[in-house]
Image (cartoon, grey):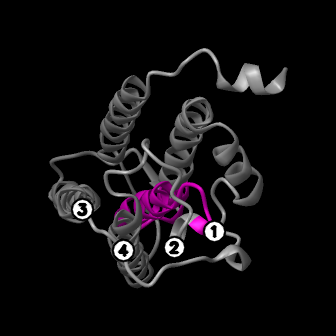
Amino acid sequence: METTTLASPRVDIGFVQTVRKIVLLVAIAIALALCLFTASRWPRTIHETIEWSGLALIFICICGRTWCSLYIGGRKNSEVVALGPYSVSRNPLYVFSIIGAAGAGAQLGAISTAIICGTLTWLVFWLVVLQEERYLLAEHGESYRAYLARVPRFLPRLSQWRNVEVLEVRSSALATTFLDACFFIAAAPVSEIVEYLQRAGLIHVFFRIP
């Protein structure tokens, strides 16, 4: 009974991915609007340390997502990929995106915005993953069910690591994933522009956050 419930009705995975992108864009727009009127309460040295730490997280995100794409680029819905990062986590692309979102939030020089951005991104991906799992169960049946039982959804289980000597890499998917990940870098100049406008008195700061 549980198997039937999980595998049906069929999930339109294209629609799910479209909704995911729209929700993330709306969340980003709301976050930017709120950030216009908030500023970090930390002294300049700590403020900049948080920003640089955020840039490090964004760098990890870009490298991590590109690495994951070596394994799954163009294969996500057509086969069960269970090698490399996908042998220790079912959704490593999303894990690295959450790290990138936290890094983007840190560009405001506040720990709280890093936590909020990372948490909201995790929530969006968690909802999407539930639908993706239904779709993949319907497509791949027992092979995907065994994968579900063996590999955790997000947090990696390093003891499960498996790899191969040679990979077939799809360059177009790799390039797309890399460019998508680079989007997180935009948080740095945007936050600097906002801070400049706030210091110039062109934008009023209503709240100072830790």
- Secondary structure under tag 1 reads loop
Magenta stretch bounds:
87-115
Question: Mark 1 highlights which residue?
Answer: 88
Q: In front here: 142 or 92?
A: 142
> Pointer 4: what residue?
167
Locate residue 165, reporting x and y percent.
44, 85
On screen, residue 182 versus residue 74, left or right, reads left
How far across and how far down the image is residue 123, in percent?
57, 41
User: Mark 1 Cα within 10 Å, few/some/many (few <14, many 20+)?
Assistant: many
Distance of label 1 from label 2 (alpha carbons): 7 Å
- Left or right position of 99 against 136: left
Distance of label 1 from label 4 (alpha carbons): 17 Å
Residue drawn at 60 percent across, 14 percent down: 9
Indicate which label's residue lies in the foreground, 1 or 3: 3
Apparent side of residue 172 relative to residue 80 in the rendered image (left or right)? left
113 is within the stretch colored magenta: yes
Q: Residues within 10 Å of mark 4 (few under 14, many from 20)?
A: few
Residue 84, labelled with which disc? 2
Query: Which of the two labelled residues, at mark 1 and mark 4, occupies the earlier sequence position?
Result: 1
Q: What residue type is disc 2 on?
A: Gly
Which numbered dot is residue 170? Answer: 3
Residue drawn 53% across the image and 69% down it: 83
Of pointers 1 and 3, the one earlier in the residue sequence: 1
Badge 4 amino acid: Leu
Q: Nearer the viewer, residue 94 or 110?
A: 94
Q: Is residue 96 above or below residue 164?
A: above
C-beta proximity under 8 Å, tags 1 and 2? no
State the image coordinates of residue 122 (x, y, percent, origin top left). 55, 48
Alpha carbon distance from label 3 to label 4: 10 Å
**Magenta stretch contains residue 59:** no
